[in-house]
Image: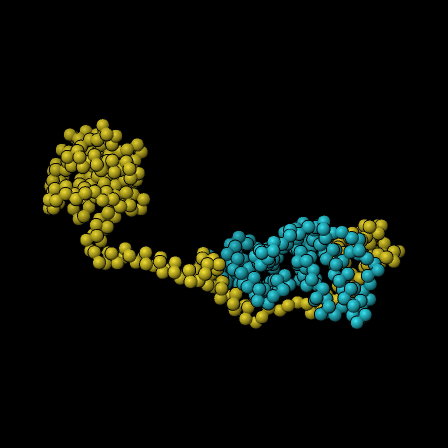
Amino acid sequence: MREQDKATHFEQAVLQHMAAAYNLARWMTHSDQDAEDVVQDAYLRAFRFFDGFHGGDSRVWLLSIVRNTCYTWLHQKQAHEPMAPFDEDLHSSSCSDLDPELLLLQSVDTTTLKEALAELPVEFREVMILRELEDLSYKEIAAIAGIPLGTVMSRLARGRGRLQQSLAARMGREKEA
Amino acid sequence: MDCDNTRGLLHAYVDGELDLVRSLEIEQHLQGCAACLQMWKNQQMLKASFAEATLYVKPPPHLQARIQASIRGAGKANPAPRTIPWRLFAFAAALVLAVALVPMLARVLSPSSSKSDSLAQEVVASHVRSLMANHLSDVASSDQHTVKPWFNGKLDFSPPVEDLSAQGFPLIGGRLDYLNDRPVAALIYQRRKHFINLFIWPTTDNSAVAAQMETLQGYHVYHWTQPGMTFWATSDLNTTELQQFVQLAQSEGH
């Protein structure tokens, strides 16, 4: 394939997913500028590997590259304070994940939800973004994050549990204030 | 379904990832269990919050153009990765250009070397041609006393012909060839599976020029001159053994 044809074909296949790519990168990096750089880098990587992409869901394919690029970026950024490998067990503890006493009697405002979501460990955050904002299936999330289906399910459950605790605490503070 | 099972599958249920049978089992359990029902309500509320909130971060308007520009750039500079600093890349490109220009300049500035280069090309082409189409030799003989007279009447000169079998380069034949706009003698020698073409023709130059080697298309080409005669030897044989052959050819009275 001629380079020019390849570029056109590539753009038709994946440029439409730029919003999803940017949203994921923005939520994972917490920075506008870094998200832009990560997305551009991810697109270049994707372009280089495009010959190896044989059909399938181009959004899932692109997001998996964006996700990996994000992790590369996170590792580089935190090179001076090495990121502890994510320990599923460490974060799986408590049944308070699903504490029925933590009532969310009303829907939460955007600002509060945004803050609480931003504070989640990135491993929970990414599956939450892919599920709640991209509306991807467990299978698609598993493909993007390169983790088993069961892990997607448990990370979502724990992520939501933590988010719920965090939201309840924030709303409690608001009431007291 | 009990509470433990229900709580284990509640998120999959909320996300619509469960099959119909298990969904119905959970619905049945929720009807009779207030605690689990409260959890389900919490999750519903959380989902509703996500749905209402504007959490989706839109990309800046210039990002698409930036990505397209970088892809088009990568396409042109392929396979240079973006991580190479552009300054370094420019320097490398300049270096490549300079290296490519040097032989071109040399050719422009030195017509004699250009002639020699194209002659070396001719020699290699003739060698390759001789290996194809079963045209290695017109006279197949390891006897120098058969090969040498064969050239009589075909050439206006008498090439020196020596068998080098004793030294490990058996003569296998001779051939009439055409190089440098004239008929020339081609002697064929063998070293294991490799053939060596030794082209000989007369020159008006009476000085001796030591052997010079160059490599073209994977073939090594040696060129030297002895008073009144010019020699070109070429083969895909390794340079060490080919050089040995050249030294033998020179010393054996060529």
Q: Relative to B131, is A133 on the left or the right?
A: right
The residue depicted at 10 percent of the width and 44 percent of the height is B206
Q: Relative to A113, is B6 on the left or the right?
A: right
Locate the C terminus of chain B and report the quarter of the image it occupies: top left
**Residue B252: image location, x then y, percent:** 17, 33
Q: Is residue B29 above or below residue B164?
A: below
- Residue B136 visible: no
How many discs appear? 0
- Residue B152 visible: yes
Which quadrant would residue A113 be assigned to in this image?
bottom right
- For chain B, give the colour: yellow
**Residue A164: image location, x then y, percent:** 77, 61
Q: Is residue A162 above or below residue B252?
A: below
Which quadrant would residue A165 be assigned to in this image?
bottom right
The residue depicted at 68 percent of the width and 50 percent of the height is A87
The residue depicted at 74 percent of the width and 55 percent of the height is A158
Nearest the viewer among B19 and A67 is A67
**Residue B77: image location, x then y, percent:** 43, 60
- For chain A, give the colour: cyan
The residue depicted at 81 percent of the width and 59 percent of the height is B40
Name the outermost residue toward the front: A80
